[in-house]
Image (cartoon, coloured by chain):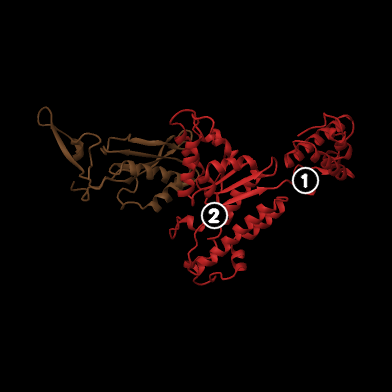
Chain colours: A brown, B red
Amino acid sequence: MMTNPTGRLTQGQFSFLPDLTDAEITLQIEYGLRQGYAWAVEYTDDPHPRNTYWEMFGMPMFDLADAAGVMLELKSCRSTFPQHYIRLVAFDSTRGVETIAMSFIVNRPSVEPGFSLVRQETNGRTIRYTIRGHEADRPEGERYRK
Amino acid sequence: MYNIPGSATASDTPLAAGTSPAETGEGVRAARTVAEVMAQSQAGGVLDELDRELVGLAPVKARIRDIAALLVIDRLRMNQGLQAQTPSLHMSFTGNPGTGKTTVALRMAQILHRLGYIRKGHLVAVTRDDLVGQYVGHTAPKTREVLKKAMGGVLFIDEAYYLYRPDNERDYGQEAIEILLQVMENNRDDLVVILAGYGDRMETFFQSNPGMRSRIAHHLEFPDFTAGELLRIAEMMLEQQNYRFGPGAREVFQDYLTHRIRQPQFANARSVRNALDRARLRQASRLFANPDKELTVDDLSTIESPDIRASRVFDLGTASAQKT
């Protein structure tokens, strides 16, 4: 789109920055652990902005003390789904909050075709708009092939 | 591992709080002698505390001193621009019951953290049930969960030989062992594994799992305590609980120890703890018998010789004089 020249997905934290290195990801995980968050790894090949629930890889990791455990899981997910979008989510389990506190993308497919605008004509000359990912034409599991 | 300039983690470790080659600009020059590094790090304090708080255990203290010395020399090497690779720290503790294996494992996590070898310094103590699953496919996630929780600290596996049950072919202990071996090798920087158990059974375990033995760098023997060491342990335990020996009570307790050591099923420090608990019971009963006496701090915190003398261990020859 004209508003996003690089075509990279801009969902979650740090999405306008260049890809985070492993060391920087570790720093973020350490911050989350210090705050008492539980980290989880999620992946998807359907990056539409309304798709909030991605598939979780493994279980959410409560009671961890160090980032190495989360990086182990992330490495495993990257080798299983190298061309999917993978993100790390941090869950804050304080009573009354119980929501995701942090979420950032850590892996992207090598080519991101992005989205296009779809116009639907309804009664009269009213047009309703939505967006549709270019890869959504292919079935699940066959998207983002290199 | 996470040494990014300007990040908080770089200055968290106690050793890095001293000089690093990047910071030796104005004030402190890079250390060139052992004394300078000792002054900058917490290694000296760790060793002193160890000597004070653990009685006996000479091979353990010697090994910890070696590890601390290696840390100091590594720091000097780094200051000179040489490579300094973290050594493998996996350990195996063997010895009789009550010789301090679990206690030292707890202290080891703190010690290694203060020496700067592990990042977080917590201890996760598990037995076979926490690692091995009950059905196919249960073991791997269970073991991985435990390993992820232990990363950055110490994983203490008590009675490690129960992991391997060669007689039952439906046992999933072997799977847990294989995952452990893989992580012990690949994540050496993240995790220290300490196995503990009785000497002969651990020997059988290592014989059937040579991969495990080769990954364990430090095999530490926990010798039985001498009578003098047990007396010192007793005094330290009493002091911790605000008690002390009355006049003559220490000699009676020494006598008790000489008798008790000869009895079967002597569990070293644990037996001493049990004996002291029983002495406290008898002291309580003795004070209980006099309801109108005003009890002072001295009365309440002194273990007198009759409290110890009443033990059945002194009656030689009777079959019922066997206690743990």
Task: Read off the chain for label 1.
Answer: B
Report whether B78 appears left or right of A7.
right
Q: Tell me the number on the disc at residue B197.
A: none
Report whether B309 appears left or right of B166.
right
**Label 2 with label 1: CB-CB less than 8 Å:** no
Residue B34, given in percent of the width and then of the height, sits at: 60, 67
CA separation in Å, label 2 and label 1:
32 Å
Residue B297 in sight:
no
Q: Residue at x 45, y 31 (%)?
A: B138
Report whether A48 appears left or right of B115.
left
Reading the image, the residue beneath label 1 is: B230
- In the foreground, B114 or B290: B114
Residue B196, given in percent of the width and then of the height, sits at: 61, 42
Residue B289 in sight:
yes
Q: Residue at x 77, y 40 (%)?
A: B272
Element marked by disc 1: helix
Dot 1 crowding, Cα within 10 Å, few <14, some 14–19, many 20+ = many
Q: Tell me the number on the disc at residue B117.
A: 2
- In the foreground, A43 or B184: B184
Element marked by disc 2: loop
Q: Earlier in the sequence, mark 2 or mark 1?
A: 2
Amino acid type shown at disc 2:
Tyr
Report whether A83 appears left or right of B202.
left
Amino acid type shown at disc 1:
Leu
**Front tag of 2 and 1:** 1
Task: Read off the chain for label 2.
Answer: B
Is circle 2 on the same chain as circle 1?
Answer: yes
